[in-house]
Every structure is written in C-alpha cells, then in structure tokens.
Image (cartoon, rainbow, N blue to C red):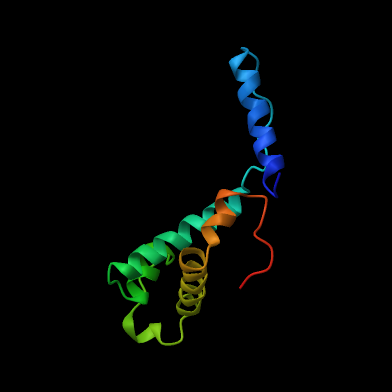
Amino acid sequence: MDESFETRLHAAGRFWRQLNGRPPGPDYGTFPPRSRQLAILTLRIFDGRKAGASYREIANALLAKEPIEPRDWRDHPLKHRIRELLRKADRMIYHGGYHDLLFYPHRRGKRH
C-alpha cells in the first residue's frame, strides 16, 4: 500500500465491472478541463522553444489574436506570459511535474 493505492483500487474496480459486462462507473480524478488546456499549452510552448522559435514567434502562433509587431514586443503582456509558461514547462519536464499529471489527483508532496 502506498499513496496511489486508492487510484489503483478504483481502476481495478472499473476493470472488474467491465470484465463482467457491467458499466465501469464514474471516472476517478478526472483532470479538470482548464488544467488540461493549460498543460497542453505549456507543452506546446516548450516544444516551440526547443525547436528554436523566439518568444514572439511562439506568442504569435499560440496566444495572439492578431500578429505582434517587433516594435510592440518589448512591453507586450504576452512576453511575460510566455516566460511564465516556459518556467512552468521546465518544472514539468525537468523536475518531475509529469508525475503530477499522470497520477492526478495525487501529488508527490513537497517540491524540491
């Protein structure tokens, strides 16, 4: 038994019900839609940066409603949003944040 026991127990129960021809029952710990969208956006921004795109190119492709001109980029609010999401992506990729996604609603506890 560990911190994920409840999740595995619920999954085993759903599996058992399906094997016996019954409906599986409700999903356990469904990831909230807004959190899912944010995780997808964060990973897309990370992929864009790893592919060599600039912050402005990423913002234009993923967040801007109309193209951002180079002269407007210096003080544009999306510049800070992109940086914030890239920091979040680094935590997700390099510091075990994927574990939190995979084992939602459980967390690893204190962050290092």
Occupied quadrant, residue 13: top right
Residue appearing at x 69%, y 42% in the figure: 5
Residue 85 locus on image (x, y percent): 50, 70
The quadrant of the image that shows the C terminus is: bottom right
Q: Is residue 30 left or right of residue 78?
A: right
Q: Residue furthest left?
A: 52
Q: How many marks?
A: 0
The x, y position of residue 81, in whole percent, is: 50, 74
Q: Nearer the viewer, residue 86 or 102?
A: 102
* 55 relative to 102, above or below: below
* Above/below status of 94 relative to 35: below
Nearest the eye: 34 or 12 = 12
Residue 10: quarter of image? top right
Location of residue 79 in the rendering, given as x and y in whole percent from the top left corner: 45, 78
The residue that appears at 55% across and 49% down in the rendered structure is 102
Residue at 34 percent of width and 70 percent of height: 49
